[in-house]
Amino acid sequence: MKIGLISGEYPPQQGGVGDFTRELARALIAAGHEAQVITTAVSRQPSASRRGWEDGVNVQRVVSSWGTRCWRQIAEVAKQDRLDVLNIQYEPAAYAMQVGVNFLPSPWVRRSIKAPIVATFHDLLVPYLFPKAGPLRWQVVEYLARHSEAVIVTNEEDRARLSNFQALTSNLHVVPIGSNIEPVDLSETDRAAERAHWGIRPDEFLLGYFGFLNLSKGGADLMQALRTLIDEGLPVKLLLIGGRAGSSDPTNAEYAAQVERLIEMLGVKERVSATGYLEPAAVSRALRACDVMVLPYIDGASPRRGSLLAAIAHGKAIVTTEPRYPLVGLKQSESAFFVSPNNLRSLASAVKQVLQNKELRTRLECGAAEAGRLYTWDRIAAQSIDVYRHAMRVE
């Protein structure tokens, strides 16, 4: 099968949708399919060098704008390479909040794009869907959903929201995301060296937070919980792993600045280290170094979160917020420790309990490692292929 994966962002840009697209493309290729990525043209890059293989993936950097201009540019690739199906990886910030891609399955574009279209919605949270657009927000999302041959969501919450569109009943599928960070093996000696690299003494605990500082990810709550743990006498430090704000969403930088001011105000600066952007192997080593991953999502834990999937894939003890819908493979106190969102006392208490109870921490680690088998890229690729075949039948 010849598959075109459309994404507004792609490495080296920093962003979860771009990382997901790269990993899905690799998994599809490993499964014997011809997958390529259609993404944003790099500024000032000569046209001749915009198409080629990057880290094992055929990448077409040909889209100069994600307004209506993208229609022709995507159509040219689809026709030239005789693609069997197009899969839009949709998250508004990845397309600079432009809506050209939303209307890719429209009748007037279908005249030049013959391949069936699958839309994967990565995040239907209101803050990311054109927050100032009012009713237009859902109209453009609904258009893409209704007119695609098939729709993929990454979690049950988004499935429930889109299932209100009656026309999607038979064309709506749930396919989870996976971790974009492949675990590396560390010996105890190597792990000790990694911890020492970040200034962690043998008698100290290391908390980990992975991902951008984003309003929905509870960074401010984490800092206040850290202050509570310090006040209670725990020898604890925090490692912020990965880039600060990413390439697509400008609100990340604003929130990150707020969190940094809070760190100063709470007096925890000496207990917090930030890695900045790291290559995947270095991210994995940093994750391995942590004792507990603390991920206090404001809207609850969800399989839409790549940071959660990375913690699961690394078999880490995880303290996170209660999911709105059950998470496959995760069970309270067995494979994750859930607390109520926006409850600083509960968050600090849960982290303290996991840190001080070695038996509980080991159980959480084993449970997370077991859950990780449900979110592997070969499984995700196989499920995606099933959806593509469905789309080709209903075309």
Image: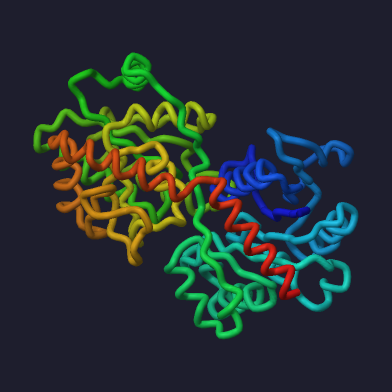
Rendered view: 390 above or below 84? below
The residue positioned 74% from the left and 54% from the top of the image is: 3
The residue positioned 46% from the left and 36% from the top of the image is: 242
Please state, as top left, top right, bottom left or bottom right, where the N terminus lies in the image.
bottom right
The count of marks equals 0
Please state, as top left, top right, bottom left or bottom right, where the C terminus lies in the image.
bottom right
Left or right: where does residue 276 sit relative to residue 389?
left
Name the spot of residue 62 as percent of width and height, x first. Answer: 81, 49
Rendered view: 332 above or below 293? below
Left or right: where does residue 371 sit relative to residue 332?
right
Name the spot of residue 345 as percent of width and height, x first. Answer: 15, 52
- Colour option used: rainbow
Left or right: where does residue 219 sit relative to residue 2?
left
Name the spot of residue 110 as percent of width and height, x first. Answer: 82, 73
Left or right: where does residue 12 sit relative to residue 49?
left
Farthest residue to the left: give it: 232
Q: Is residue 229 visible?
A: yes
Where residue 167 sits, quadrant-wise, is: bottom right
Q: Nearer the viewer, residue 241 or 182?
A: 182
Q: Nearer the viewer, residue 64 or 366?
A: 366
Q: Is residue 197 visible?
A: no
Rendered view: 353 above or below 73? above
Rendered view: 272 above or below 90? above
The residue positioned 20% from the left and 43% from the top of the image is: 351
Name the spot of residue 151 as percent of width and height, x first. Answer: 61, 69
Q: Nearer the viewer, residue 247 or 158?
A: 158
The residue positioned 73% from the left and 60% from the top of the image is: 86
